[in-house]
Image (tube, rainbow, N blue to C red):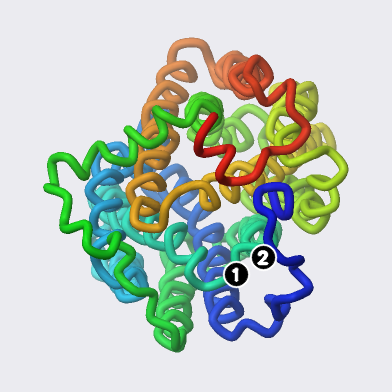
Amino acid sequence: MTAHLTRTAPAMARPSLWRSRNFLLLWSGQTVSEIGTRVSGVAVPLLAADTLGAGVFQISLLTFLAWLPYLIFSLPAGILADRVDQRRLMIACDLGRAALLLSLPVVALVGHLTLVFLYVVVGLSGVLTVAFTVAYRSMLPGLVPAEHLAEGNARLEVTENLAQLAGPTAGGALVGLVGATRTFLADSLSFLVSAVTLLLIRRRVADPEAPGSGRVPVRAALTEGLGFIRRQRILAKVLACTATSNFFVMAARSIDVAYLLRTVHASAVTVGLVFSIGSIGGLLTGMLAARLTALLGTARTIWVAMAAPGPLYLLMPLARAGWGVVLYGVGMAAFSANAVLYNVAAMTYRQRITPAHLLGRVNAAFLWFSYGAVPLGALAGGTLASQLGLRPALWVCVLGMWGAALFVVCSPLRRMRDFPAVADVTRTS
């Protein structure tokens, strides 16, 4: 979503993002942090399964606890992000997460690492991640020109997929070489690097509270973002699609390591490689996001990205031992391609039409619904796997992932190629 949204000067009139010191610092810090996060994304369930002997449902609880804070703390985090220095908030969250992850190898060293302690670390890290994510998504429009916003979002999505490509492989290899607990040292260091890069950003993003408007009471502010979304017809449809997709995606993610280890009989290194294969689709799509959006249209991109890759998701529950495990990676690659293209288009649209003083609360409301569905999905995934078995549960998940596209396919987006100018969108959406 670029020039179709506004009638501004062409992007060539502004310096390239490659010359933006603030964006490059944010981007580089996030790259390192995302790689570390992907390493621990493999290490946490492997630590629970192999070192602590957790069952399938106990492993799925880790995903539930990691995402539960989005359901509980997203709306308050939106108020916080709109009223404090977002950069300092992000730095504090990075330092807190680094300390929490560092505690895992320390506690393991003295022989007191338990599944309960792992649950506590994962849950508290999730709280800090909520605050960081809301501030991060609200800070970007203040760092880059409006005409480069889609480009900035695309690059950050590419970073995430690069991390998904390198992180799981590195995580599986590190777990095999040094053990799961020592692997968390790398993730802790990555958050410290992110904090340093944020500290070096010179521009302080001002408090985005609307000038002269006064502070909205907390109780009213909690629902202000939700009210804005409810008045925007397209945003409401996108939110329903995202929340439904996230529910089923995380139901699958809560059992995928157990499925690959216990049903497909893959090794820890192979699990990491499969996840890396899965990130290739998103990486390639992120690099081509601007061209694909121009080809398809800013509005059409949203529903095409959700619907077209769906049949390939069905390859995931068809994975078998040996080379058949590649089928799982192909299905994941199809989904990551969808996720990148859809996220870039939907997020840029949201950032462009939302008033600056409401952006934190609108982002928080999106996180509350879309990410709040994640812990419920993780819990559902573990329950389905316990009752039906891992492979049948995965069939339910992939069908739900594809079915989420109906919200945007059966919406005004299907009759549009591009979004109108911002003024028209906010008046008619």
- How far is disc 2 from disc 1 in space, using C-alphas? 5 Å
Is residue 331 visible from the viewing direction of this image? Answer: no
Residue 62 is drawn in which quadrant? top left
Q: What residue would you read off at disc 1?
A: 145
In depth, the one of 310 and 209 nearer the eye is 209
Quarter that holds the C terminus? top right
Determine the residue positioned at 41% across, 19% down: 383
- Helix, strand, or loop for circle 1? loop
- Helix, strand, or loop for circle 2? helix
Counting from the top left corner in percent of width and height, residue 296 is at 83, 38
- The reply to whether discs 2 and 1 touch (Cβ–Cβ < 8 Å) is yes
Q: Callout 2 environment at 10 Å: few (<14), some (14 to 19), or many (20+)?
A: many
Counting from the top left corner in percent of width and height, residue 255 is at 52, 31
Q: What residue would you read off at disc 2?
A: 148
Residue 10 vs 386, above or below: the answer is below
Determine the residue positioned at 22% across, 48% down: 76
Counting from the top left corner in percent of width and height, residue 282 is at 73, 49
In depth, the one of 393 and 105 nearer the eye is 393
Residue 300 vs 35, above or below: the answer is above
Q: Callout 1 environment at 10 Å: few (<14), some (14 to 19), or many (20+)?
A: some
Counting from the top left corner in percent of width and height, residue 364 is at 35, 46
Determine the residue positioned at 50% across, 52% down: 41
Q: How many marks?
A: 2
Specify the amino acid type for callout 2.
His
Determine the residue positioned at 68% across, 85% down: 19
Specify the amino acid type for callout 1.
Pro
